[in-house]
Amino acid sequence: MDVKRAGPGSAALHLADGVRLLRPDEQVFTAMLDGWRNQQLARNLSFGTVENRQRAVRAFATHAQALPWRWTPQLVDEWCTDLRAVRRVRRSTLRGYQEAVRTFCAYLTDPAYGWISECEKRFGTHPVQVVHEWNAAVHVAAAEGDPAKRAFTLDEMQALLDYADEQVTRIRAAGRKGWLPAFRDATLFKVAYGYGLRRNETRMLDVADFGRNPHADEFGEYGVLYVRHGKAMKGSPPKRRSVLTVWGWVPEILAEWIDEIRPLLAVDGNPALWPSERASRVGLAQINARLSAYRDALGLGAGLDFHSLRRSYVTHLIEAGWDPLFVQQQVGHEHASTTAIYTCVSSDFRTRTLRQALDATMDAALRPSRRAQ
């Protein structure tokens, strides 16, 4: 293959022609992974996605104790059996691992990249596709999440936010400096719930990401939140959206945090809304740890995680009678069916809705009789 014409990921770009390798198996596999990485980056996939896929391929190679030119579908079957029976991975995780191996094999077996001829020359065999429709998990359900995952009820949400505020008061009264991070995290949870944000969307907010809503002057400088780090799709950049403020208490807690408390924690020039005492921005692990600690202290189920704040936002707006299309646009869902999955209306809400429908039906049935009298 002409090196000058080789595209990203081609064997000719990663293995010098005619050069004898000291450890051919190991070096060729490494070159394959490097080439695949370049090919995926050329498709504008995120670095995190590429790294996770490479990690899955390495895990399969380790389990199979074989390199790609000796892989077989049977090795995939054994690996997936181990993942399910021993490691107990989730359905979506298993499918992701299989997709990584399938994509890697598709890359290796594409003649355009030259790996087939390279392996035949060096090892007398070549890679084949080992993940097929008949030995891979099928995505048949719209929602494959853990059934334990759910939204907070209104009472649970109030208890969580009250408990977070109590920890700030307790730590500050004890004279410990940890009250500032505790205050930050309590406000962070409120904002995530108040706008229905994902975890990374919340973490990546800056102070400048708020603006006025000319149709809702009562919210002042916090009438609109501009999300700049929304969930990306299929190699696209982060998806932007604007989220309108709907609850009056949100601007109040934001103003207190930004004007009074945040300056005590943030260094000059740091734009992050949630600065850390050790870094410019709070970490995801720290956010998870704090929420888990508060949840466990309240005796709430492990199915309530950070994403439950977003589920709760959707659920509570729907329960309050907000238009489903408005809610869908607020949370940035492309399809209404996705918003429906997030909606976990409470039994009390359903009971009230049923009662209202029955009362309306009964009233309509009796109204003609009343006119006749």
Image (cartoon, rainbow, N blue to C red):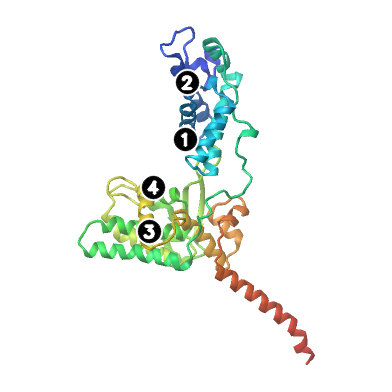
Kindly identify which numbered label has been placed on residue 29: 2
Q: Give the image quarter of residue 103.
A: top right
Q: Residue at 55% across / 52% down in the picture? A: 332
Q: Residue at x 48, y 7 (%)?
A: 18
Disc 3 to disc 4, C-alpha distance: 18 Å
> Mark 1 or mark 2, which has the lower sequence index?
2
Q: Which residue is mark 4?
A: 284
- Badge 1 is on which residue? 52
- Secondary structure beneath dot 1 equals helix
Horizontal and vertical percent for residue 249? 42, 67
User: Which part of the image, by quadrant, shows the C terminus?
Assistant: bottom right
Q: Classify mark 2: helix, strand or loop.
A: helix
Three-letter amino acid code at the position of disc 4: Leu
Q: Nearer the viewer, mark 1 or mark 3?
A: 3
Q: Is residue 340 above or below residue 84?
A: below
Q: In this rendering, is residue 91 above or below 35?
A: below
